[in-house]
Image (cartoon, rainbow, N blue to C red):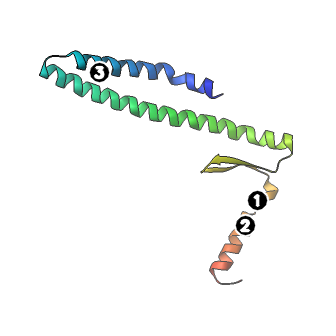
Amino acid sequence: MSIDMKRVGEKELNQRKQIVDSLYSLLENSRYTSEKESIMKRFIFEKENLEEFTQKFSEEESSKIWQRIRSYAPGFSKEKGYRIVLGMQPNETVLYGDENNDVTNDFLKYINDKYEGNK
């Protein structure tokens, strides 16, 4: 699954890397200061774009993978007879929970009672 997701943006990522690499090569081989300054500005710009693209691509692909994992959780739970499936991400601690296990209202009442000093 992650291999398929990774292939999606690899072409663009490689193209951007080639641009940065070619600018770096030009920079290394340039003899004139004015030419180096121009190439350096473009190199910095393209390198920042590459880093931004890489970060964004990584976040988007990770998000797609987790969306797919979350979509599988209910079916897996029902097939295996599980009432809860825990995740591994800090913001995804529960991937699936049977509605009969939802104690949110009970917990809210409990913490409100504690806060108000009633118990």
Say which label, 1 or 3, has the lower sequence index.
Answer: 3
Q: Which mark identifies residue 102?
A: 1
Q: Residue at 40% x, 34% y: name it.
A: 52
Residue 16 image label: none
- Observer-side mark, 1 or 3, equals 3
Q: What's under tag 2, amino acid-wise?
A: Asn
The picture places residue 78, in percent across and down from the top left corner, at 84, 43
Q: Is 67 rendered above or below residue 103? A: above
User: Mark 2 — residue?
Assistant: 105
- Amino acid type at mark 1: Asp
Nearest to the eye among marks 3 and 2: give it: 3
Q: CA distance from mark 1 to mark 3?
A: 57 Å
Disc 1 and disc 2: Cα gap in Å? 8 Å
Q: Residues within 10 Å of mark 3 (few under 14, many from 20)?
A: some
* Picture coordinates of residue 65, whole percent (x, y): 62, 34
State the image quarter where residue 34 is shown.
top left
- Mark 3: amino acid: Tyr
For label 2, count other residues whose C-alpha is less than 10 Å away and answer few (under 14), some (14-19) or many (20+). few
Secondary structure of the residue carrying numbered label 1: loop
**Residue under the image location 67 percent in, 35 percent down:** 68
Asked if marks 1 and 3 touch (Cβ < 8 Å), the reply is no
Secondary element type, mark 3: helix
Name the N-terminal-most of marks 3 and 2. Answer: 3
Q: Is residue 49 left or right of residue 10?
A: left
Label 1–label 2 contact, CB within 8 A? yes
Distance between mark 3 and mark 2 Cα atoms: 60 Å
Disc number placed over residue 24 in the picture, else none = 3
Q: Residue at x 74, y 37 (%)?
A: 72
Left/right of residue 75 with respect to residue 31 in the rendered view: right
Q: The C terminus is located in which quarter?
A: bottom right
Residue 73 location (% of width, % of height): 75, 41
